[in-house]
Image: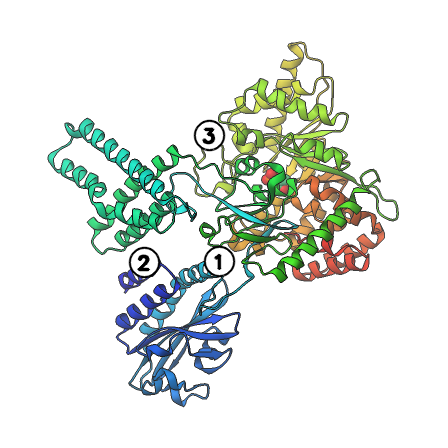
Amino acid sequence: MLDRLRSIVQEVSTAKDLQSALDIIVNRVREALHTQVCSIYLLDQEFHCHVLMASEGLNKDAVGRVSLELGEGLVGLVAKHAEPVNLRDAPLHPHFQYLADTGEEDFHAFLGVPIIHHRSVLGVLIVQHRERRRFDEGEEAFLVTLSAQLAGVIAHAEATGAIEGISPSGHRIFDTAFSGVSGCAGVAIGTSVVIYPHADLSHIPERLIDDVEAEVDYFNACLNAVREEMRELNEQVGGRLAEEERLLFDAYVRILDDDALGNEVVERIRMGHWAQGALGHVANEHLRAFESMEDEYMRERAVDIRDLCARVLSHLQQEKPDKPEYPDDTILVGEELTASTLVEVPKNKLKGLISVKGSGNSHVAILARTMGTPTVMGAVDLPFHQLDGKPLIVDGYKGEVVTNPSEHLLEQFRATIREQEELNRDLAGLKDLPCETADNHRVSLWVNTGLMSDVPRSLDQGAEGIGLFRTEVPFLLAERFPSEQEQTDIYREQLDTCAPKPVTMRTLDIGGDKALSYFPIEEANPFLGWRGIRVTLDHPEIFTAQVRAMMRASIGLDNLQIMLPMVSNVREVETAASLIRKSYHELLQEGADLPFPPIGVMIELPAAVYQTRALARMVDFVSIGSNDLTQYLLAVDRNNPRVANLFSSYHPAVLSALQHVVDQAHAENKPVSICGEMAGNPGAAVLLVAMGFDILSMNAAALLRVKSVIRSMTLEAGRKLLGKVMRMEDEQLIRNAVDMALYEAGVDRLLRSQRVN
Ligand code: PEP
Ligand code: MG
């Protein structure tokens, strides 16, 4: 049974489009269950009905023409309850709806199961039989399992059609929305540029070309280059191979000589596709076919095909490096965007970002917020390969991407962009005003930085200091560990530009989702593993070079603070502090003249929350990293789009942990700040001020928004709101209560629509 399931799923996933996928399903399921009918109805959102999309056993003419209104018939019943319906004699059921065109009057036994993807019912998979009998438990379980596995494939095929502007039943459609989560609030309209990893066959975007003959020649030249390469390799290793291995190698090389694969690619190029895309398409079709074969030896051949095609791809890419052209309204789209890909796009051209993987708390989203670029993360169902060059809307408020935008919708979004611009102009007037509540309670607004370019922008927004300089960002962009002198130069620039305002430099926080290409950390659970201070304490040479560089950079400026990430116990702080002291004394001995910098600890783990008092006693300040604290308190991976909706700063457990840390740090007379993304959310900021935080540190783009909201409320009103939400048990109610309070205080609609993650 398992084999049959696997082979159906494999076969369906090789289908070229939705219709062929559905045809394969009805065919193979009817065969596997020995039934007389297998059909699929899919929901057509646009026309609010379920359309008969494929059938084996019913009248073929009815396919694509017969439909049922929502809730109508047994199909409607299965879809409505999202549960299987298994009937001995369907026509006797009160919901049975006789559809004359289908010829189903001859069939009595009926089993319908919902096709569910991400909690929504896409359609219904049905088998029918002439006899009056219930389908047995095994058959029902088979169909349920199959439907669950196929839902993703169907959703993907549907989405691909939607991108081309076609509904499942073949109608022209507009405004198809793909949901993800908000990465950075704001709206952008633009043209997508899809970026993809190199030499990776499964991630090549579709592109069309004009000069077909030149592309064919270019492909053939690269194919010949790989043939030549393989012949040379054969000669080099030939003598060292045993007879049996030699035969295998010959068979391997013959894959290229076999004209089939090359010809198929050329055929696809002649249809107007670029060589890379054509190769990827053909290679993937062959790979899926080989991978679904029963014979293990044949399955293994997939590895050879992948390797050879990757070699050809690499030639195609090397000889004509694909430097994307960035249009003036670029929306960068990628499966997993990284910090380095973002900085490659000229700043004035980048309008929006979409990442298929990751969530609102991934580091790339944090970077996007620093740049103020509307971003959607975790748009997992978006068939991004097909998007290159297409017009898109990025709705960073809702966390949605809209493809095929209609003129009507574009006009609505243009109006929001105008509203945004107007709001920004109003906010600019707040730059030089103090951040205080309407009843004169003063709070400090600081910023988080990573790149030097963040600093002038931050100062320009009226930042009073840097609450978090993520020192790993320059490390991430380098190709080896920066030397002590290189680090000193980078840090000096930040400290100098900000002086006399304080700069909080966090010691290297790598691991988790921040990997250095030159220092790979392979772990099953990276967020629970070797991360932050755990890495640097195990490598004191890296730690001391960094803190020495920080201190040397601060000579004469005296505005440095050092902060320790990912602390889980007092011993880590003791060890780190003693390494900092040692480095400090070395610098003094070398003749440097500087004061010992204030040291702070980040509270990012539940363990640290409960040791706040002990930790606060050992340091000069405390800062909450609410991104990680929320991730660890709620056991929600901050990068995983599947659980992104569970990541909530308004969870009562998160709010009470924050209040606890503030109270405990203050009991030791130590200032407490928050430098997680929550601080940059206007609604959350009101609660944080009421909790007693001394400093809120956020991305520069959020600063004036937060200031405007704080200035429009009294501390008294904030405290009242806090008192109320602290008694609530459900994060959704808390969210509503905060939203209502902002509404009553007359806060702008766009500031309120900035969702807190
Ligand atoms: C945090 O965890 O809240 C934090 C500020 O650190 P990072 O986001 O860099 O992990
Ligand atoms: Mg953190």
Residue drawn at (28%, 78%) of the image:
36
The residue that disc 3 covers is: 519
Where is residue 440? Give x, y as percent: 88, 45
Pick whichever, 10 or 635, lies toward us: 10
Say left or right for 104 vs 679.
left
Q: Upstream in the sequence, badge 1 or badge 2?
A: 2
Q: Are marks 2 and 3 in contact (CB under 8 Å)?
A: no
Circle 3: element type: loop
Residue 273 lies, with reference to residue 492, above or below; the image says below
The residue that disc 1 covers is: 163
The residue under label 1 is which amino acid type? Answer: Ile
Circle 1: element type: helix
Distance of label 1 from label 2 (alpha carbons): 24 Å
The residue that disc 2 covers is: 10
Q: Is the CB of the residue bearing disc 1 within 8 angstroms of ligand 1?
A: no
Residue drawn at (46%, 30%) of the image:
519
Q: Upstream in the sequence, badge 3 or badge 1?
A: 1
Whether residue 533 appears in this view of the structure is yes
The residue under label 2 is which amino acid type? Answer: Gln
Q: Quadrant of ligand 1?
A: top right
Say left or right for 165 vs 437.
left
Residue 218 image label: none
Where is residue 481? Give x, y as percent: 51, 24
Crowding at dot 3, Cα within 10 Å, few <14 / some 14-19 / many 20+, comes out as few
Pick whichever, 745 or 506, lies toward us: 745
When asked about the image quadrant of residue 570, the answer is: top right
Where is residue 305? Give x, y as percent: 27, 44
Crowding at dot 2, Cα within 10 Å, few <14 / some 14-19 / many 20+, comes out as some
Where is residue 117? Give x, y as percent: 46, 63
Residue drawn at (56%, 25%) of the image:
543
